Image (spheres, helix red, strand yellow):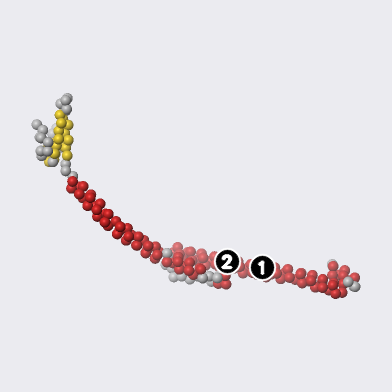
Amino acid sequence: PFPLEGEETEILVNQSEEGEGQRYTTLESADWTATADGEVLLQVSYDITWFREIVEAVLFWMLIFFPFILLISLLVSYITTRISFAPVRELSQKIRKITPASLGQTVQLDIKNQQMEELLENYNAMSQRLRLSFEDQRLFVSNASHELRSPIVTIKGYSSMLLRWGKEDNALLEESLQ
């Protein structure tokens, strides 16, 4: 009843109990073995070398084109990064040129990026605050120097007067000590 090994045959697949929905396929080989209790084991195979050939061809072309695709993607990434960070480099160069004397000057750039505009505004505001802080500090040091210099000048004047005339005149000595 079963065909010999390697012989093409039609085998019933997915037969329901009522016999409806029958489907047939042509196979390249069907091997069968009968067991001692009367069961039959059927081994069905179909040639899929065409699939293996497709997979090998795809793998071959992937190995050939992958380095080129990788190189192109790296080049595009590099160019995109250079273009994207150009305003940052320009801002960095202008900030490097700022000296203590030019601290309050604002940095102007032609930027179309909202984040970079915000960064530039924040830098300029910080620069103005630093300039004002340094001016306040300079003014404080100047005032403190003047306030310290005045009493020292007075003390120095009294001491030089005492050295010249205070030794003989007790009234003058008493006045300068008070």
Residue 124 in percent (x, y) is at 52, 67
Residue 140 in percent (x, y) is at 66, 68
- Label 2 vs 1, first from the N-terminus: 2
Amino acid found under the numbered disc labelled 2: Leu
Residue at the disc numbered 2? 130
Q: Quadrant of residue 164?
A: bottom right
Please determine whether, in this image, residue 31 is positioned above or below residue 139: above
Residue 111 in percent (x, y) is at 43, 68
Residue at the disc numbered 1? 140
Crowding at label 1, few (<14), some or many (≥20) Cα neighbours within 10 Å?
few
Please determine whether, in this image, residue 89 is positioned above or below residue 24: below
Please determine whether, in this image, residue 146 is positioned above or below residue 50: below
Q: Are marks 2 and 1 in contact (CB under 8 Å)?
A: no
**Residue at the spot 51% in from the left edge and 68% down from the top edge:** 96
Crowding at label 2, few (<14), some or many (≥20) Cα neighbours within 10 Å?
some
Please determine whether, in this image, residue 59 is positioned above or below residue 11: below
**Residue at the spot 10% in from the left edge and 38% down from the top edge:** 7
Q: Answer yes or no: is residue 78 visible.
A: yes
